[in-house]
Image (spheres, grey):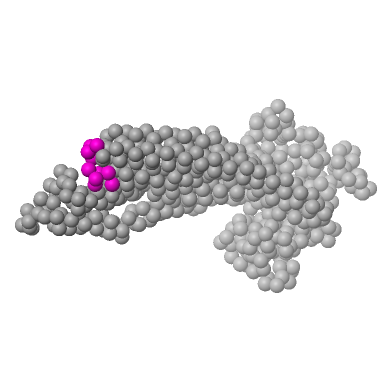
Amino acid sequence: MAKFVDILKYFGNYWKISVFSIAMMSLFELIDLFVPYAIGQILNVLSGQPLDRILQSMVNSVAQIGQVEINQSFTLTVLLVLVGVVSVGRAPIQPWIGPWFAWDVAFRARRENAEAALKKVLTLPLEFYDENNAGRVAARVAKGLSNHTWTYPTLTSQLFPKIFRLIGIFLVIWFIEWRIAILVLVSLLGVLAFDLRGLKKLSEQEERLDKYAENTESRTSEIVTNIKTVKAFATETSELKRQQQRFDREFKVLDYRIHKGYIILGTYERTIVQSCVFLVFALTVFATAQGRISLGHFITTFTVSSMAFAEVEPITQVAEFFARRYGPMIRFHEFMKLPVGLDASSLATHPEAVPQYRFTGKVEFSHLRFGYNVDRPVLKDINLLIEPYQTVALVGRSGSGKSTLVKLLFRYFEPNEGKILIDGQDIRRLDVSGYRKRLAIVHQEVDIFNGTLMENLLYGNPNAPIEQVHEACRIAQADDFIRQMPAGYSTIVGERGVRLSGGQRQRIGIARALIVDPDVLIFDEATSSLDYESERSIQLAMRSILGTRTLIIIAHRLSTVREADQIVVLDQGNIVEVGNHEELLQQGGLYQRLHSLQETGELLA
């Protein structure tokens, strides 16, 4: 569970410069109090009343150094020079001590934590993304970073210096009349305590609203991602109505509950503050009339006490500002505290530090057992040996464990029992990043990034020579259609490859995998959603790869696996048959039944 201290740790690497800038800004706030104090002293000089002992000693010292006679004009000149130094002399310095450092720290912390957030995104386990879509994750990170960035300058340049200013005001009034100082202190503490109590309750509502808004944004992101499906089923009206209801709920909570709460809180605060200002004014008048303080001290006391109460509203506004942003910041730190996946170590700071493996492609699954829920195994005592350069097909009904076996091979998950060996080495003892670089996979739905075809092709191996790219595209049956594109290899494919057909995306996926030059290449149902012509092109591409490396094919369509050296049939997490196409047909087992169903046009169960 994230706490307030996590917000402070966000800026932890810059605490020294933060302390320095806050201290200097606070010092300027205290120095600023000299002006109303000096004005009161000037009024004393003009009315013939004595200066305070400290200022009189200063005037005497200046007169002695300059060997000047002390009179009213000289005293006023000294006071005016002091006021000028304080007010004008600090003007070119304060912006660099305040706004510069405040925003500099905010921007540096944002850069640092944006990198940390991206590392978190890259190292979270896959199951996290099964439960949270991209819009939800991106919104939480973006809002968290943004709110931290805007909050820091406000707190450091306004809240903390204002607090020191109030302390300085209390000391000035205490020096003049301690009874009034105590009244001002008690009044200020009471008002601020009242405000903070109200803000705490409103902040809790803000946090709940932020969670609700995150769900709304997540749904909007899903609508954008699946806009073709929305239009295909003509559900625009229902989606709009559903979101309108959520927007209405958000508005009512935000406007009638939270915003109204801030207005009510502000109403009470202003009434109490004005009452306190009037009470201090009345007591100061009586103290002056009774001769306890001079006329100059009356002006100083009333001026600085009014300044103190005037700071209540800015302080509460800063507190309100923080309360409104507290929820997204806490949600960001909750995200940053999520446990990383078992493969988190694959994120190397320096890519050159990743071990460069090279395997023959011999893969062995030994007594492998795995379940996403330990009590419900998906794979049960799997024993399978794949020789180098061999083509092995995994077939079976949906849910039989084919894709799970590949996920374990890629170390997305660790087996509950048993092990996986590559060239006789337990893959758990290998650097996960270096190991994965020797594997490649072509999924049923190939992920395409918004950019050029060349950028997508080079994604796994950015340093591949252009000749290797052209050869991979030729083998993948992609070269012809790429050359027909408006800009060839420089054609922008759009987000998620919307400008490409399903078959074209598959062929780009195959070429991209070949450019990596993997020791083990996996096809995960690469043709199951394609038309006949596209499937034929993919089959030709796969046929040209046979024997060049270890090839694992997961398939529903058995027509794609006939030429495999070995076909492994899985059923309910067990290997039930192993052999080539002809051998399995003769056995008359599950493979033969699945084959018959497809031959007669029936769907594979």
**Is residue 540 visible to us here?**
no
Q: Is residue 82 above or below residue 124?
A: below
> On the rendered structure, is 391 left or right of 452?
right
Q: In x, y percent, where is residue 28?
A: 30, 50
> For the point 44% across and 34% down, which residue is it?
193
Q: Residue furthest right?
A: 600
Where is residue 377, by image quadrant? top right
> For the point 58% across and 44% down, which residue is it?
259
Where is residue 334, by image quadrant? top right
Where is residue 281, by image quadrant? top left
As for residue 427 lying within the magenta part, the answer is no
> For the point 78% across and 38% down, which residue is it?
399
* Between 29 and 222, the one nearer to me in the picture: 29
Residue numbers of the magenta segment: 290-299
> On the rendered structure, is 577 left or right of 179?
right
Q: In x, y percent, where is residue 198?
A: 51, 36
Q: Residue furthest front?
A: 289
> For the point 68% across and 29% down, which residue is it?
374
* Between 464 and 11, the one nearer to me in the picture: 11
Q: Quadrant of the C terminus?
A: top right
* Between 604 and 38, the one nearer to me in the picture: 38
Q: Quadrant of the N terminus?
A: top right
**Is residue 300 visible to us here?**
yes
> On the rendered structure, is 41 left or right of 416?
left
* Between 164 and 534, the one nearer to me in the picture: 164
